[in-house]
Amino acid sequence: MSKRRVLLAAAVGVAIGYLAREQMNNYQKITPEKALNNAKEMFKRKGPISGSWIYMKPEEIEKNGLLYSAYRGGITRNIDGENKQYEFYVDVETGGIVETKEVA
């Protein structure tokens, strides 16, 4: 009987742990590292990149009348022997790129 209780308690513990992890994944905001990786993947579609950075603290930005909490970062690309820098904003909630612009 004690083995049965131990197995039942272990099964219940695993189930609760799994459900808790799934709930945390649903409500967890994107990390700055993941935001940078998303942006790098988008820029890599148009060609290689030579450098990247991201601020770890989100900023409030307004785009098309909507207010976003977003990470600000940058990408450097070498195009025809010339370095071009781009700045981007990634939404903290969804990980989507809100805005990109070339830095002069």
Image (cartoon, grey):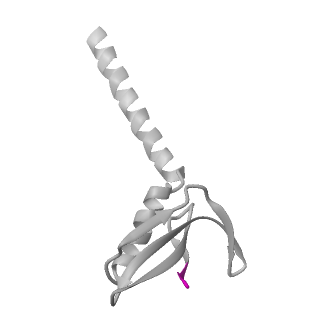
Residue at 47% across, 79% down = 85
Residue 64 position, x and y percent, is: 68, 81
Quadrant housing residue 60: bottom right
Q: 20 left or right of 45?
A: right
Task: Give yes or no for residue 95 being in the magenta stretch.
Answer: no
Q: Nearer the viewer, residue 83 or 6?
A: 83
Q: 26 left or right of 46?
A: right
Residue 87 position, x and y percent, is: 53, 75
Quadrant housing residue 21: top left
Q: In the image, which residues are magenta?
A: 100-104
Question: Can I make out residue 13 in this image?
Answer: yes
In this view, which residue lies farthest toward the bottom?
80
The quadrant of the image that shows the C terminus is bottom right
In this view, which residue lies farthest toward the left?
3
Residue at 33% across, 28% down = 11
The quadrant of the image that shows the N terminus is top left
